[in-house]
Amino acid sequence: MPDESANGLFEYAQRKGYDWGTIGTIPEIPGLAVRYNGHVGVYIGNGKVVEERGFNYGCVITNLQDRKWTHWYKIPALKYVTGSSESAIKTELGSRLLKKGSVGDDVKQLQVLLNQVLNLDLATDGQYGNNTVNAVIKFQNRYKLTSDGIYGSQTHAALMSVLADRTPDTDSKTPSEPTSETYAVNASTLNVRAGNDTSYNIITTLHNGDIINPVIGLDGKPLVSKNNWYAIYILEQIGWISGKYVMMK
């Protein structure tokens, strides 16, 4: 292919009929180009982009959502392989954001669980297609979540909560012996929010010494976001608290 500028490469790909779209529709395919006017980067999967940001930054890995990308497209010089090699991706459900185009073992886990919870007949093929998007929207609507069809931390926490309610208690331990870790508040007051940062609405307020129960993921560990916020059960729903102000009990 010819040498092209950042804008010229996008125009060349369009002329040649390669797949492209707005950034909100980007599929989970490593090797896609992402662009805005005069700049280009390479998507490497899991919400990360490699880009050259000039002498002040150098060649860096950045978060897709933190930059002002407007479009994605397939680079004409690359061969994008699909099929069994993609479906063999092994990732734990809840360890990354899933959306249309995502592929992997965690997508298959999600499909199996949605079938159980919603009494559906989704194909459990590990491909996050339109049927899986619609199933996630159905789940989100049922449990009063943002119905965007994207499986993120809040939807994961809600699904884990539903599954916990459905699981029979077969443990022989007495009620005085807790079956999971608990948290204690280590601050005079601590706001519980509907999401995992301070931009979300406050659900309630906790106080120093309050004991709270964490949401446990499929891996058996407490659910913690990348920015160190903890998912907890509070007032018969899922809430989030900053990890700076809690300690394990």
Image: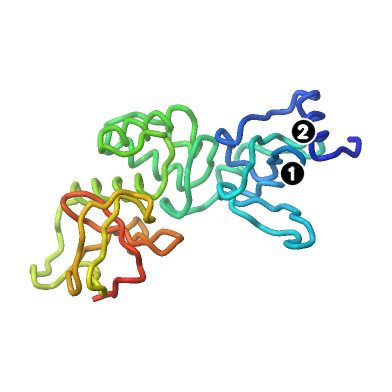
| 59 over 33 or under it: above or below | below
Earlier in the chain: of badge 2 and badge 1, it is 2
Marks 2 & 1, CB-CB < 8 Å contact = yes
Q: Which quarter of the image is occupied by the C terminus?
A: bottom left
Q: Residue 20 occupies which quadrant of the picture?
A: top right
Q: Residue 240 occupies which quadrant of the picture?
A: bottom left
121 and 183: which one is in front? Answer: 183
> Which amino acid type corresponds to the residue marked 1 in the rendered image?
Val
175 and 137: which one is in front? Answer: 137
Q: Residue at x 79, y 29 (%)?
A: 11
- Could you tell whether 179 is left or right of 86 in the image? left
Q: Residues within 10 Å of mark 1 (few under 14, many from 20)?
A: many
Q: Secondary structure at mark 1?
A: strand
* Rendered location of residue 204, percent (x, y): 20, 55
Q: Which quarter of the image is occupied by the N terminus?
A: top right
> Which amino acid type corresponds to the residue marked 2 in the rendered image?
Phe
The number of numbered discs placed on residues in the rendered structure image is 2
Q: Which residue is mark 2?
A: 10
The single residue placed furthest to the right in the displayed view is: 2
Residue 101's label in the rendered image is none
188 and 238: which one is in front? Answer: 188
Q: Secondary structure at mark 2?
A: helix
Q: Residue at x 71, y 47 (%)?
A: 42
* Rendered location of residue 195, percent (x, y): 34, 51
* Rendered location of residue 93, percent (x, y): 42, 51
Residue 40's label in the rendered image is 1
